[in-house]
Amino acid sequence: MAQFELYKDRIDEYRWKFRADNNKIIADSSEGYINKSDCKHGIELVKQQAPDAEIVDKT
């Protein structure tokens, strides 16, 4: 089952990874968060925005 994984990095900041059903990482946070609640908020933003995201082919 796909899931968001919340963890602390080497400098003690919160980050997230999104793992697909096959456990491969397909997205991650582009920044570390000092507050856990801010990291969770970032996850929620991705969850809200992704269903309507379009694919833009710039090739």
Image: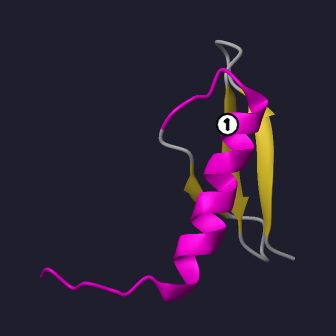
The colour mode here is: secondary structure
**Which residue is the extreme one toward the left?**
59
In the rendered image, residue 25, in percent from the top left (x then y), is placed at 65, 59
Question: In the image, 20: left or right of 42?
Answer: right
Q: Residue at x 78, y 66 (%)?
A: 23
Q: Is residue 17 magenta?
A: no
Position of 39 with respect to 2 (left or right) is left
Q: Give above or below for 55 relative to 4.
A: below
Residue 16 picture quarter: top right
Give residue 14's quadrant in the image.
top right
Q: Is residue 27 above or below residue 57?
A: above
Q: Would you place residue 39 above or below residue 43 in this image?
A: above
Q: Is residue 27 above or below residue 50?
A: above
The residue identified by callout 1 is 38
**Residue 45 percent coordinates (x, y):** 59, 60
Q: Residue at x 58, y 63 (%)?
A: 46
Please state, as top left, top right, bottom left or bottom right, where the C terminus lies in the image: bottom left
Task: State the image quarter where residue 7 is shown.
Answer: top right
Q: Say which amino acid is labelled 1.
A: Asp
What residue span does the magenta drawing correspond to? 31-59
